[in-house]
Amino acid sequence: MIYTKIDKLNRYKGLGSSLDRAIDYLTGGGIETVMPGKNEVDGDRVFVNCFSYYTKPASEAAFEAHDRCLDIHLVLSGRERIGIAARDRMKETKRDEINDGITLEGEAEQFIRMEPGDVLIAFPEDAHQVKVEADGSCEVKKAVVKVLL
């Protein structure tokens, strides 16, 4: 897991060509042009899903993880917390091989507060619990960059 600010994201270049492409896109202003839904950056290797939702209590939010990609989470408006836990300490409950989605059960080891300008990169070993309220429920507009490893 990497937690940083968007203006510090360039520090993490060099970890892989697809991650570099995602970082270049984000720091080059690409995130300002995203539309709701799927936005292509580099075919299926790097793309952005943009969506909105209302946050909820941690007890109602699911954990997820991925085998083939990492997620770069950016809150565009609103605020949320993301629960983080080591994936190998969680119980897998569902697997979607086609969409690289794994649903998990367990407890968060820590929560990361996310507001506009914050960036959280979740690697395959990082179970992450999204949509968790911070200071009560609110609407969040979010972009998640999917980077194929």
Image (cartoon, grey):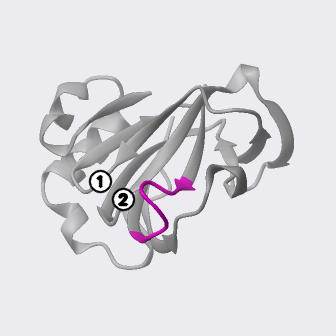
Q: Do the residues labelled 2 and 1 touch (CB within 8 Å)?
A: yes
Q: Which image quadrant for residue 18?
A: top left
The amino acid type found where label 2 is placed reads Arg
For this rendering, which residue is in front, 135 or 139?
135
Q: Which image quadrant for residue 113?
A: top left
Tell me if residue 111 comes above or below residue 31 in the rendering.
above
Q: What element carries label 1?
A: loop
Side (left or right) of 33 relative to 48: left
Residue 146, can we see it?
A: no
Q: Residue at x 49, y 67 (%)?
A: 137
For this rendering, which residue is in front, 100 or 106?
106
Can you identify the residue that label 1 sits on? 115
Whole-percent x and y of residue 141? 38, 70
The quarter of the image holding the N terminus is: top left
Magenta range: 131-140
Q: Which residue is drawn at 22% across and 73% down?
A: 33
Q: Residue at x 35, y 78 (%)?
A: 35
Whole-percent x and y of residue 41? 34, 60
Side (left or right) of 109 relative to 45: right
